[in-house]
Image (cartoon, helix red, strand yellow):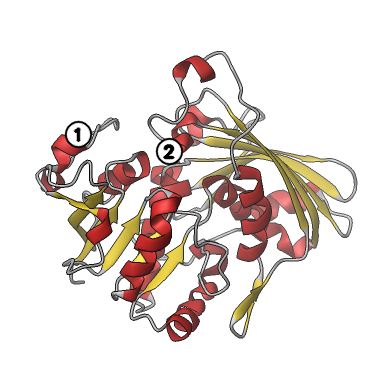
Amino acid sequence: MRRIKVGILGATGSVGQRFVDLLRDHPWFEIAEVYASERSAGKSYREAAKWFLDRAIPESVAELEVKNVNAASKNADVEIMFSALPGDVARDVEKECAKAGYAVTSNVSVHRMEEDVPLVIPEVNADHLRLIEVQRRRRGWDGFIVTNPNCSTIMMTMTLKPLMEFGIEEVHVATMQAVSGAGYAGVPSMAIIDNVIPFISREEEKMETETLKILGTLESERIKNAEFKVTASCHRVPVLDGHTEAIWVRFSKDVNVEDVKAAFKNFKSTLDTPFAPRTPLILREEQDRPQPRLDRDAERGMAVSVGRVRQSGSKEVKYIALGHNTVRGAAGAAILNAEILVKEKYI
């Protein structure tokens, strides 16, 4: 397969750095352009990025000149733009890139709920990519925008997909979210050490709406949302990486906890790309798992772990889910989406 040149929008931020790190040895994609704010433009990536990941900046990227993100749609020598921009900037920049002919695979929330923009977890709803043709036709674009969900939404929705066969009626979730989800400077250490913060702006709304779009059905040129209710309560905890979620699912009929466990075990993926996990959903049998330190890096951070599956009434089960928020929940999810776009010949 030919190497495809890609750009990273917002390359100096926390998710942008994950893109740089995860793409360093990618067999299909080559980082050719990095973009950030005017403050960083003109510097080398090494100078502009306050690098915080364990591994060093890839040498192939370190000396790339950081370009102004506002010029990203003009003459970039790339086919794919990975976006990790702040929402207020992403709104216009992503549209301009798509209009200019680039495939934009975005980790940003700003376009997720637009009717003709696919919101995709490939193991769950890859068929929603057919909205790309609707989007191009309606907007007159040569390129397009595809989004991945919020990090917490991804973890929960991956576990809900195999349970759809039992008739989901209602979902309640309480999250314990890692500090890396707020970015490098997002939560001051004096605020989070020895503390739990019981509010994350707009996080609950994202979980309650995005899940229904992802698990909905594509009907002609729109998504019909799944017909159950999601109620979320989101909390920031002093964990570096890995979002943990306590989930309660009520069904329309009686269920057996062993059938639910079997559904988790049998959830398989037919994806065959470099970032696709062989086992996207891993059932942890130990009573004290999953845990962030033990399980966040499963399948290179691309798998979701589920455990403590318990009966809670004849029509309800409860369990714990966990995933790596900046890999499966952010940059890795966008990269996997791009791989599927290549496989399906949208790129």
Is any part of residue 157 visible from this angle? Answer: yes
- Closest to the observer, 167 or 213: 213
Q: Tell me which amino acid carries mark 2.
A: Asp
Identify the residue at horizontal 37%, vertical 50% (top origin).
84
Q: Residues within 10 Å of mark 2 (few under 14, many from 20)?
A: some
Q: Residues within 10 Å of mark 1 (few under 14, many from 20)?
A: few
Left or right placement of residue 297 versus residue 193 in this view: left
**Mark whose residue sits in front, 2 or 1:** 1
Within the image, what quadrant is residue 106 found in? bottom left
Within the image, what quadrant is residue 321 found in? top right
Q: Tell me which amino acid carries mark 1.
A: Ala
Within the image, what quadrant is residue 93 found in? bottom left
User: Which quadrant is the N terminus positioned in?
Assistant: bottom left
- Label 1, secondary structure: give it: loop
User: Which quadrant is the C terminus positioned in?
Assistant: bottom left
Where residue 62 appears, as percent x and y from the top left, is 13, 42
Identify the residue at horizontal 16%, vertical 42% (top origin).
45
Identify the residue at horizontal 28%, vertical 30% (top origin).
54
Answer above or below: position of 194 versus 162. Answer: above
Is any part of residue 265 visible from this angle? Answer: no
Where residue 94 appears, as percent x and y from the top left, is 37, 63
Answer above or below: position of 38 versus 347. Answer: above
Left or right placement of residue 175 versus residue 37 in this view: right
Answer above or below: position of 310 versus 164. Answer: above
Where residue 56 appears, as percent x and y from the top left, is 19, 34
Task: Kindly identify which residue carries mark 1.
Answer: 56
Mark 2 and mark 1: span between their CA atoms? 19 Å
Task: Kindly identify which residue carries mark 2.
Answer: 297
